[in-house]
Image (spheres, helix red, strand yellow):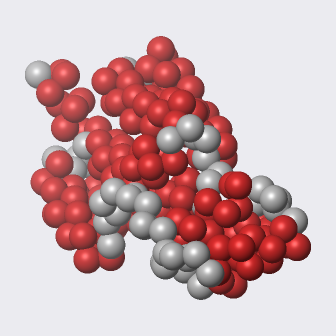
Amino acid sequence: MDPKIDDYIWENRERYTREAIREQLVAAGHDPAAVDAAWDRVAGEPAAPTRPIGWRPRGREFFLLVVLGAISMVFVWADEPYGAGAIAPVVYIFLASIGFAIGKWFSIMVDAGNALTPIILLGLVAIGGAMMAVVSSTLLLALAVAILAGVPALLLFYLRGTNPNGAGMVGAAIPILIWLAVTGTCYAPLFARLGGG
């Protein structure tokens, strides 16, 4: 009997199908027979309250964020050479969409009980941002990227295994933090003008 399997089934059985939960647990390395046995134990028990996971932006909210960001890119890049003002919104939409998808994947990993992969990847981004801050002229931007990646990585490292609710809240914030990092990076010309002026 593995209490982690029972807890995971309790927390997710109201939101996901049995097949989806079983697939997640087996993918996480649990024995399929142990997962099936846990279902038999949990099936007759009253439903557990759903674990709070915090606000997680859906398609409509993300669409609004991206549209507002793309409009602002026209103004931020308007004075840049080679028609960057016209290209910038398209590039921004592409980068923001990829970043948001990665963030949602991180959140799903955290919800499934696997915080280690997001910790490692966010930690690598934080280290890269810190190294950029040492050698780059866009010091504030690089530091912001390092902080936006490093803080959730440290929180997940601290919370994993001890506070699933807290880890879930951090996981729910990751897509927005990645969106902020992408948006801030796309404001580079504005930061350069402010720094030079």
Q: Nearer the viewer, residue 83 or 191?
A: 191
Can you say whether 177 is above or below 172 in the image?
A: above
Quarter occupied by residue 56:
bottom left
Look at 69% across and 55% down and name the residue there. 4
Can you say whether 156 is above or below 41 in the image?
A: above
Left or right: where 161 falls relative to 71: right
Look at 43% across and 67% down and name the residue there. 50
Q: Nearer the viewer, residue 56 or 13?
A: 13
Residue 44 position, x and y percent, is 62, 81
Quarter occupied by residue 40:
bottom right
Q: Nearer the viewer, residue 23 or 131?
A: 23
Left or right: where 69 falls relative to 32: left
Task: Name the quadrant of the N terminus.
Answer: bottom right
Residue 70 position, x and y percent, is 23, 63
Residue 100 position, x and y percent, is 42, 61
- Can residue 95 be seen? no
Look at 35% across and 30% down and name the residue there. 144
Left or right: where 68 falls relative to 7: left
**Residue positioned most to the top:** 134
Look at 62% across and 63% down and name the residue there. 8
Looking at the image, how many numbered discs can be counted on the residues?
0
Can you say whether 73 is above or below 147 in the image?
A: below
Q: Nearer the viewer, residue 59 or 164?
A: 164
- Can residue 107 be seen? yes
